[in-house]
Amino acid sequence: MKAVWTFALARLALVVGLGLILGLFVGPPWLGVVIAFGLYLGWQLRNLYLLERWLRLRSQLDPPAIGGIWGDVVTQIVRLYRRKQYHKQRLAQLFRELRRSTAALPDGVIVLGGQHEIVWFNRRAASLLGLKRPVDVGLRIDNLIRAPEFIRYLHSNDYAAPLVMRPPTDTESYLALQIVPYGAGQSLLLARDVTEQRRLEAMRKDFVANASHELRTPLTVIAGYLDTLAEDPAIDPVWRSPIRDMRAQAQRMNAIIADLLELSRLEANDAEAPQAPIDVPALLERLARDALARAERPGEVRLELEARAGLLGDAREIESAFTNLVDNAIKYTPPTGRIELRWRVDDSGAHFAVVDTGIGIPSQHLPRLTERFYRVDAGRSRSQGGSGLGLAIVKHALQRHGGRLTVESVEGTGSTFTAHFPPARVVREPTVDGGGDRR
């Protein structure tokens, strides 16, 4: 590059020298220099014209044979063009490989633009969602999938969990749809056929519900006989202790079956809970009194009502959820500890929190607490008569009310379980100053 510019400057100096020599013959020296510069400018314009013409008709013409600095410019342009062609071919190859790989996926893949318009989709997505190429490319996905639950999911910006729904082309199957944002406002819509999983889940639920119903009657008979035997003064004293143990285990089994039936009822009903008014403060006052009346309980039970607001929902389900949260806190808090029941309302909705100073929960267990039969400490839970279903019941009851459960815990310090309800479920009342303490 340096040599080219040195040659160009030498050529310019030669033009000036020739102009001066020409000026000695035709008149003043400056006139010769002007004539030489004019010829030099015309030559440069010719080179510029050839370059512009080649750039405009590059696919038809060969690069112009221009020397000097212009030839170097042409060479650089040719290199850039070849490099661009290489990267373009490489990108096209990668895109073809991506299309072949996504076409082979068992799941549907749809690329969505910033306005949720369809940019591309694979064959599986076309099969599952009834899409057609190329007529559907460029259309908004919510204009093609008009299910209200999908539109709410699409605009919710909460894509942590997939949406399970019926596909628009088949009312007998189920699809799991999940959006994965990426790039500048773009996203992937993944579609998977989960019909078989739903069928197996339904079979499991039916089996649990039917088995629980079938076990309830014989267990009730057994428990009745054990109660009679426990109260019979003619029973040999040697048998009193075994009968007492059998009676306790029968009661525990009855509690597990009752929880299974309650959970099956909640899982079988996907509809939203009714909108009946519930006096939450009165319910919490009763739960606090019941906790204080227990023989085995923490040393302090406190109720803090920051609002007198109630809820719209199913009173039985709300009481079951709140009772399970309070029972958990009592079971895992020592007699020297404390539990607090807190009820408050703000702009985001209503919140019921149960705070304890119990044994706490290791962080690795928190994501699985609401799974049925999941136990952090199986030995301790069984010794205290827990069924492992309480938090699963809480989760499903809250979902029926549009709510959710959050858990904060520090091992060895205590836990806070909070049930959150949306504003639409709140029956607002005038706020009171402070709350009542129950010890």
Image: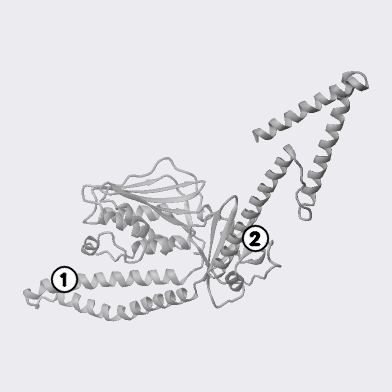
Residue 209: % across, % down: 38, 76
| Mark 2 and mark 1 residues within 8 Å of each other at the beta carbon | no
**Which residue is labeled 1 in the image?**
245
Which residue: 84% across, 28% down?
37
The numbered dot on residue 210 is none
Using residue 255 as the reference point, say whether residue 193 is left or right of it: right
Indicate the amino acid at tag 1. Answer: Asp
Which residue: 26% across, 54% down?
332
Q: Is residue 356 visible?
A: no
Q: Which of 277 and 87 is in front in this view?
A: 87
Residue 256: % across, % down: 30, 70
Residue 86 lies, with reference to residue 400, above or below; the image says: above
**Which residue is labeled 2 in the image?**
119
Mark in front: 2 vs 1 = 2
Q: For mark 2, give the secondary structure.
A: strand
Q: Distance between the residues labelled 2 and 1?
A: 67 Å
Residue 208 lies, with reference to residue 75, above or below; the image says: below
Q: Residues within 10 Å of mark 1 (few under 14, many from 20)?
A: few
Using residue 317 as the reference point, say whether residue 297 is left or right of it: left
Residue 230: % across, % down: 15, 74
- Which of the 4 image quarters holds residue 390? bottom left
Q: Nearer the viewer, residue 222 or 418?
A: 418
Using residue 231 as the reference point, say whether residue 133 is left or right of it: right
Q: Which of marks 2 and 1 is nearer the N terminus?
A: 2
Q: Is residue 405 visible?
A: yes
Indicate the amino acid at tag 2. Answer: Val
